[in-house]
């Protein structure tokens, strides 16, 4: 992945090709040999929220969970979560 750098001595901007998470903060400038510092400003993360804000998503999930709870009232859960044997055949569902 290409990471942008700028030389402190000559001001030249250049890119360094490093694996993600392995890019150093400083590298030698290819022009003058000075210190090139990594430029962090202006990087785009490419994050896009689809379907509204995180708060709206949380509210939709809350209403779906409430609806599902209403549908399940009075029903036995479809699967047994866990069963423990307390000895002498005394098995209890949890």
Image (cartoon, rainbow, N blue to C red):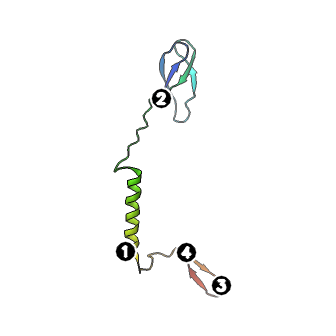
Label drawn at residue 71: 1
Q: Of circles 1 and 3, which is in front?
A: 1
Residue at which label 3 appears: 87
Q: Nearer the viewer, residue 27 or 70?
A: 70
Separation of residues labelled 3 and 4 (CA atoms): 16 Å
Residue 55 position in % (x across, y down): 41, 53
Q: Of circles 4 and 2, which is in front?
A: 2
Asked if the residue at tag 2 contacts the one at tag 3, i.e. Cβ–Cβ closer than 8 Å, the answer is: no
Q: Nearer the viewer, residue 12 or 59?
A: 59
Q: Of circles 1 and 4, which is in front?
A: 1
Looking at the image, which residue is at 52% across and 33% down? 19
Looking at the image, which residue is at 45% across and 31% down? 43
Residue 59, relative to residue 87: is it above or below?
A: above
Asked if the residue at tag 4 contacts the one at tag 3, i.e. Cβ–Cβ closer than 8 Å, the answer is: no
Residue 88, relative to residue 69: is it above or below?
A: below
Q: Quadrant of residue 32?
A: top right
Q: Is residue 66 left or right of residue 19?
A: left
**Counting residues from the N terminus, which is met first, the one under dot 4 or under dot 2?**
2
Separation of residues labelled 1 and 3 (CA atoms): 36 Å
Q: Is residue 85 left or right of residue 39?
A: right
Describe the element under mark 4 as helix, strand or loop: loop
Separation of residues labelled 4 and 2 (CA atoms): 52 Å
Residue at which label 2 appears: 41
Q: Nearer the viewer, residue 63 or 43?
A: 63
Looking at the image, which residue is at 56% across and 33% down? 22
Residue 49, relative to residue 59: is it above or below?
A: above
Residue at which label 4 appears: 82
Residue 10 position in % (x across, y down): 52, 12
């Amino acid at each position: 992945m290409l990471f942008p750098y700028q030389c402190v001595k000559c001001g030249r901007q250049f890119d360094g090709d490093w694996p993600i998470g392995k890019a150093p903060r400083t590298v030698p400038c290819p022009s003058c040999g000075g210190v090139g510092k990594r430029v962090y400003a202006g990087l785009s993360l490419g994050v896009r929220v689809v379907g509204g804000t995180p708060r709206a998503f949380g509210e939709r999930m809350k209403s779906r969970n409430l609806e599902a709870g209403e549908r399940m009232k009075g029903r036995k859960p479809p699967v047994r979560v866990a069963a423990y044997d307390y000895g002498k055949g005394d098995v209890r569902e949890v």
